[in-house]
Image: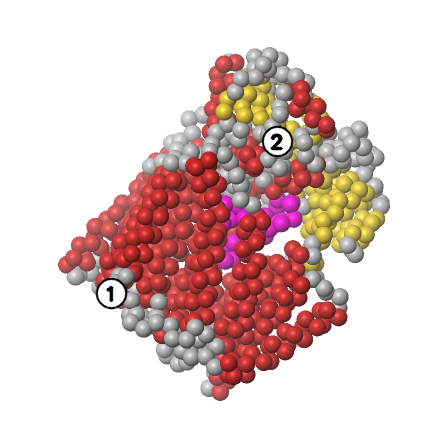
Amino acid sequence: MKRPILVASMVALVLVAGLSVLLATRHPVSDATSANSPLVGRLAPALEGPYLGRTGTFDLAAHRGQIVVVNFWASWCVPCQLEAANLSTVAWSERHRGVDLVGVVFNDTVAAALAFARHYGSLYPSIVDHGGVLANRYGVTAPPTTFVIGRTGRVVAFLVGPLGTAQLEHVIARVRAQES
Amino acid sequence: MTLTWLGRAALYLALLAPIAGIVDQGRALARHRRSHALILAVAAMVGIVGAVAVMQYALVTHNFSLAYVAENNATFTPLLYSITGMWSALEGSLLLWVLLLDALALGVVLYYRREARDAVVGWATLVLFAVMTFFTLLMVGPADPFLANPAIVHQGAGPNALLQDNPLVAMHPPLLYLGFVGFTVPFAFAVAMLVTGRVQDRWPLEQRRWSVLAWGALSVGIVLGAWWSYQVLGWGGFWGWDPVENAALLPWLTATAYIHSVIVQDRRGLFRVWNLSLAIATFALTVLGTFFTRSGVLQSVHAFSSSTLGPLLIGFFFVVVALGAVLLAWRGDRLRSPVGVGHPFSREGLFVANNVLFVGFAIVVLLGTIFPLLYEAVNGGQVSVGTPYFASVAAPMSVVLLVLMAVAPLVSWRAASARVLWGRLRVTAWAALGVVVVLIVAGVRRPTELVACFLATAAAGAALRTLRGAFVSARRRGRWLAVLRAPSTGGMIVHLGVVVLALGIVTSTSYATRSEVTLAAGQRTVVDGQYVSFTGFHQVRDALETQTQVLVSVDGHSLRPAITTYNGRQSQSVGTPAIDSNLARDVYVTFDALGGGATSGAQVGGALPAGSVVLGVTVEPLLAWLWIGGLVVGLGALMTLARRPQGVDA
């Protein structure tokens, strides 16, 4: 090779061009898919459980009149790691606007779940689903699965997979528009 | 409304000045006359300072007519967190970014004002103006910090709970940004040197100073970020190989390679083109890091909410790399140094090893960071690359790094002689062996710890030996203080800081114990040799938060781990750990659960007796040395700035 630097810089350029195209075409976190569930349109099943990492119990019935986002998660689930920061962002920005976010931990140890919530700086409460009772009741088989429950207590959206900030905000806005 | 217009007017000034600068500088270069760079850099600075002043005024007075203030401030936000609110979200953080960038550009123009007609300075100024234009344009276009708020807001949302918990929020981002922004200067000069074809002058070494400034700020910024995470998040760790942490680490790695290999260029005239490539790569990686944090493509603890900046930033990244690659392809082969490294075991040969190590590790980290995206593009599924991948490379790399630090400063330039080297190494080698024997006698048995201590002692010995040399020669000339400005003093102090930091990391992670204890009021227990007792509760209520503190005493020191609920609503609560730290160990206590009633989160199945608490207790030996090491690194970097040029007397 007579001009090694010429060759090397051209190779680098091609690699970086490929990388740039790849990065430029990525969507902001692949969004969850809105799926059908027999629950959509019906009254949400009872949801009650002890908070993770602090005292007290969460009871869905006490939140009638609010929009409640229920997110089933577990610390071992990779997509849950992807969406954790997004859920905190939405929980924080919507906290004065009649939206409550609650996580439901199932199929997990409490210590691992607590470590997960801390690591991701979780800004919403989670409850512990001992024995997967709540997951069964909601027909959840794998995390992350998210339900959006309207002010009247009906399930209005069922989302499978990791949520993006914009997507969740969009669903919440839609629910608000429908119910006002 | 007034604030919106004031802020925007200031931003337009900050945008038009560098645009005018590009045109003016271009004409000046074409006609070989002086440019008006100084006045335009001052104008840009006035513009951005005006914009920052408007934003700060709005934040401090809780003026919710700006949407940004309504989102990131509240009537009850304390002054400190009102000020730091400027960098707690995307749009405002760009204000800080451009403020630092414009200040640095003004600094460069002022520093080289006597040489303003030199083509290298001219081209570098032009590149600086171009970078300023790009980042200011982001705020005039898609990320406008001065968007008016149409709604009437009485209280405001307030900054994210985690960002109003610790004063380190005021230090970590500005230093990190200064580090990122600082690499613009070496990049600008690298481009200028390639365009003019002058790589043999004093410019490469001049650039080392600017790089060390940025490198020092970035190092301290990263360490402070780790410290923040350790104090606030409550998981007891300080580094998680999160994509955004990696984004800060990547330019740090290539910059570390750069500030070492540029020494070889200074002393031996080698690596000319390689150094330029490193300067360009470092700046490109800062842009890529900015993309990772602000595009929402990678999820991380730090990600700003998804924005439309992604394509712009990645486009800019590509332009930077393409410009660098084309210039290197055009000039590179002619600028290469005619000779190569003579002996692989000479000083310059070991600098090559250093560069292979740092650049290699940068590639490993980059691959790990983008692998989830590659995987998703090919397979459609999601994976995360976690700590095991990075740690499995970082551990052997640290070993090689310490070996290099122990040997390289003692090896001669050009040729190596095993006898001379052993003569210089002997004392530290025996000392290191002695330390290991003492440790074994004292009961330390873990091989990782013993190896780390052996190498760390040897590396510290090498640094101290070099420092002693500088000291002796300063004394001989009767000028004691000259040792502070000796060529290698700052660098060797950085080495000592790294040694201390490495010992802190290795010991605290390999000897950490985590346990969870349940205590009733007044009860006492022993965790890993520390007496932990729980005495009661304390409630603190103010307009901002309700805090439930647990009064705990660790070895007689009182600690208050707490759970903080913000603003009267139960749904947002943050656990705040409490730390009892001394030079020997850190005891890290978190409030995990509270007994009373039938249920408690931290207890599976069985109920806790009322009035008892569950505490997470983590004991990490020597952890404080990590922060001390980081500060020593920053100090060494500062001393390097005052360094005497090598040629004057060495």
Q: Residue pushed farthest top?
A: A42
Q: Which chain is indicated by disc 1?
A: B
- Residue A73 — which label? 2
| Residue lying at 58% horizontally and 49% vertically, measured from the top left | B388
| Number of dots carrying numbers | 2
- Residue B241 — which label? none
Q: Position of residue B350 (x, y in %)?
A: 46, 70
Assess disc 1: are there few (<14), some (14-19) or many (≥20) residues with their C-alpha within 10 Å of its C-alpha: some
Vertical position of residue B97 compared to residue B643: above or below: above
Q: Is residue B188 visible?
A: no
The span shown in magenta is: B219-247
Q: Which residue is mark 1?
A: B334
| Residue lying at 38% horizontally and 44% vertically, measured from the top left | A19
Q: Is residue A113 visible?
A: yes
| Front of the two marks 1 and 2 | 1
Assess disc 2: are there few (<14), some (14-19) or many (≥20) residues with their C-alpha within 10 Å of its C-alpha: many
Residue A109 placement: quadrant: top right
Asked if badges 1 and 2 are on one and the same chain, I answer: no
Q: Position of residue B254 (x, y in %)?
A: 43, 58
Identify which residue, B357 or B524, lies in the foreground: B357
Question: Alpha carbon of mark 1 to alpha carbon of mark 2: how far?
Answer: 59 Å
Residue B251 placement: quadrant: bottom left
